[in-house]
Structure formats: structure tokens, C-alpha cells
Image (cartoon, rainbow, N blue to C red):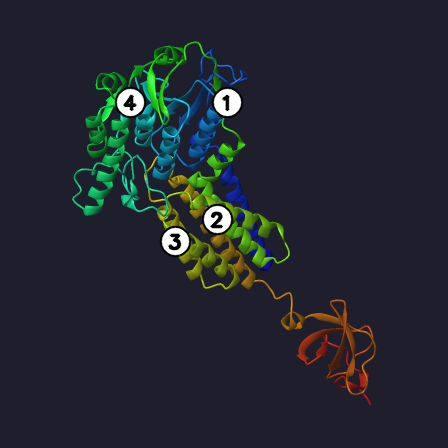
Amino acid sequence: MNGYVRASLLILGLLLLGSLLAPAMSARQASAADAGDEVAGTEAAGTEAAGAVLLLEIKGGIGPATRDYLRRGLKQAAEQSAAAVVLRIDTPGGLDAATRDINQAILASEVPVIGWVAPEGARAASAGTYILYACHLAAMAPATSLGAATPVSIGGGGPGIAPDPGQSPGDGDDGADDGAGAGDDSAMTHKVVNDAVAYLRSLAELRGRDVAFAEAAVREAATLSAGQAHKRGVIEIIAADLPRLLAEADGRSVRLRDGEAVLGTRDRPVVAVEPGWRFRLLSVLTEPSVAYLLLLIGLYGLIFEGYSPGAIVPGVVGAICLLLALYALQVLPVNYAGVALIVLGVVLIAVEFAMPSFGALGIGGVVALIAGSLIMFDTQVPGFGVSGQLILGIGMASALTFAGAVWLAARARSRPVTTGVEELLGASALALADFDADGRGTVRVHGEVWQARAAVPVERGEPVRVQALDGLVLRVAPVGERPQPAHAQPGGER
């Protein structure tokens, strides 16, 4: 049975590892890898950055990886005395703490930051609106939009910004509308909305932009197109491409932390700051689907090591995956009740393998695993949830593995015993010598030599069958009918 258990756990582990390869190339990570590919011929990646314009990219959900990438990009711009930084934005929203950290880096930047919602068809929804307001100069390409910045609490129902773990809802959850931002009468909702309004108003006042829209974007989830935003003074420039943006920005005065600065961006070389390995690694690790799979692989790896002590590889892989999962979970909006249910489910399934309970533990484990997976990331922020198809696949894989183990156990019960004392009963043996007058002798059974005794004489080389076991002595009897002496036959003469 142990072999079947190991095989079942190994199959499940391989299924989980295979599933890991798909979400690892998520939309957020793949789009980040393509940052800068759409820039026009004015870009020169190999050009010296001193006096150049650095191009950074926000594409997809905003999280810890985006925060790290932008911080490093702004630091690089300051170190190389760049003329300006263009922050190209196309995002549906993201996490609150990451957004605030990005805004703090922009506000403290020694280099002017131009926020540009592009390319055509892009949006700066939710967290993107806050970042655009924080930039020294705001621009949009035609056919783009911004707004929809109503806070979404954990468990909310719409795209937007979600609070980070360890942060109370009143700490400034900025995000998109869930349809109930202004209509909810709860004190907590008012607190969250008012805090978000004050935050966005302060950015609008700092940059001299439309304060009324800033408040409407939070309270009413208001949105504007590029043309509307320009008319209302939410942005300063409409530019379809990067050369036009730089030409329009040239000569404008912006307010930096240390005073006023005049932009000199016309005909400047553009250097696209490509995301490095650290960004790509963080993008993968903080992808909720990947964090979820790492947690499962870590748990199953440690359990498999427990079933097969000394295997080493499952334990090492499981420990590494579990630590990576814990790192990812502490920077994601996680419901730890869901994590506890997942751990409980995996443990129950493992216990079912070791201590069969006619399916009670296994079924309970599968139910707990699926329930925990559904509520683990209870937020609707785009890019920060686990696919229902992935959860269904994991649930089915766990259920099939559990069912397979139960089937193997049931089939094993119907097989003849192949080990232990019971296996000797009825086995064929061969007498190694004539039994003595007391019926004692030795026999060979399954390649082993045993002491034996018989109620009738047994000769050397005679086949016998084991009938019972008395301690370390076998009770045997000759196989088949033995020929009777002539004088014992009916009608025979003495």
C-alpha cells in the first residue's frame, strides 16, 4: 500500500508542477516583458541615459513587482541626470500600498515624471488615476480613459484597488467602483471613501488639476475620455505618440520637490528601461495563481517526504516552494481562513492515505481544499485572483488521486496475503529429510528452512502443505493421498 500511496502523491505533484507552467506566464508578467516594444524610432536603448528621456511602463495590475520596477527606474533616472521620465500607463488598478509607494517615489523624484496614458485604447483606471494625478505632467493618447477610483474593500465586487494585507480598510483603499461606493451607509465605507477622496484631492491640489473630478472619481466612480480630461484640466497634454508628447512637454514648467524645473525634452533620445530579472521573478511569485500553486506543491512535497523519509528531493522542493509561497502571500490580499482551509484539506487527504476512513477524511479534505481555494483571494482586483478553472482542476486532481488511492486499497483487500504468518498457511513445502519417530523434521518453504512436525511419517523429498504455525514450528501434512501398505488393503492376507 505504501508504494501506491507514494505513486499517487507523485502523480498529484506532477499535475501541480505542470499546472504551474501555465500561469507563470500571466498577462501581467508577459506584458511587462514586452515593455518598450511599441516605442517609436526615437528610442535608443543603447544610448547614454545622461540627458535622455527614460521610458518606464505600467501595464496590467499594479503590485509589489511594479513598485520595485518603478522605484529602480526613478533612481536610475536621478543617478544618470535624465532630462525626464515618461511613465506610460495602461492599468485596470492594483494594490493600495504599492500605489501609494509609487506615488511617494514620484513626489520625491529629482527628475520630472510625465504620466502618459497610452497607447490608444489604454486606460488609467483606479490606481492608474492616482498615479497620473501624482505625476508632474499628465498626458493621454486619444481614445484612452481614466477614473473609476471608488474604493473596493476585500471581498468587493468590481475592478479596482484593494488593501494590502495587514492594512485596515480605513488606511486609504483606493480603487475602482464596485457600485456601492457612495450608497453604503456603513461608517467603515464612509471612512474609506473619505480617506480616498482626501488623498486624491491632495494630489489634485498639488498639481493644480481639477479637484471636482478627483472627488467624483472616488465617490461616483466617474470616468473621462482623453478629450474630456483635457478640457476639464485633469491632464495637460494629448499626444498620440512619444515624439509628439516630448515636443508638447518641451518648455513647460513643473514643480519638483526642490523647486521649479523647465522641461527640455524635444528631440531628446529615449531609453526604454526594460524590466530586469528581479521584476520578472517578483511578477511570477506575486501572481496569485502561482502563489496558490506554490503553497500546494510545498505542502504536498513535505507530506511526500514524510511518507518516504530519506527521499530528500520532495522535502527540499516542498520547503523551497512553501517559503516562496509564504513570501508571496504576505504581500498579497489574502484571507488566511482560506489558507487554513487549504492546509487542513491537504492534511486530511494525506491522513486518508495513511489511515483509511472509508472516504470520510478524504472527502472532507477535498471539500476543505476547494472552499479554501475559493476564499483565499477574496478580492476582485484584476490580476489578483485565482482562476476558477485552476481551482476546479486542482480540486479534480485531488479528488481523482484520493479516489484512486481508495480504489487501490479496496483492490488490495481482495488479493491473497503475500506477507506475514497468514501467507504461510496453505503454502507448499518440501521435506529436506525423513521425519523422526516423533514426527519432527525440516522443510523448505519459499526458500526458507523451517522446523516442522507432522502427525504421519514424512520421507525425504516428499511434498507437504503447511496447515498451522506453532511458534516457530510448522505443522504440515503430506500432499494428496499416500499409497497404503499391501497388508492394510481390504481382503489382503497377513
Mark 4, residue position: 145
The numbered mark, 3 or 1, whose residue comes first in the sequence reads 1
CA distance separating discs 2 and 4: 39 Å
Residue at the spot 57% in from the left edge and 58% down from the top edge:
306
Residue contact at pointers 1 and 4, CB within 8 angstroms: no
Q: Amino acid at mark 3?
A: Val
Closer-to-camera residue (106/239) = 106
Q: Secondary structure at mark 1?
A: loop
Against 338, residue 246 (above or below) is above
**Residue 121 in sight here:** no
The numbered mark, 2 or 4, whose residue comes first in the sequence reads 4
CA distance separating discs 3 and 2: 15 Å
Residue at the spot 23% in from the left edge and 18% down from the top edge:
228
Mark 4 Cα shell of 10 Å, populated few (<14), some (14-19), many (≥20): many
Against 356, residue 163 (above or below) is above
Residue at the spot 33% in from the left edge and 20% down from the top edge:
254
> Of circles 3 and 1, which is in front?
1
CA distance separating discs 1 and 4: 32 Å
**What percent of the width, then of the height, locates residue 211?**
21, 27
The numbered mark, 1 or 4, whose residue comes first in the sequence reads 1
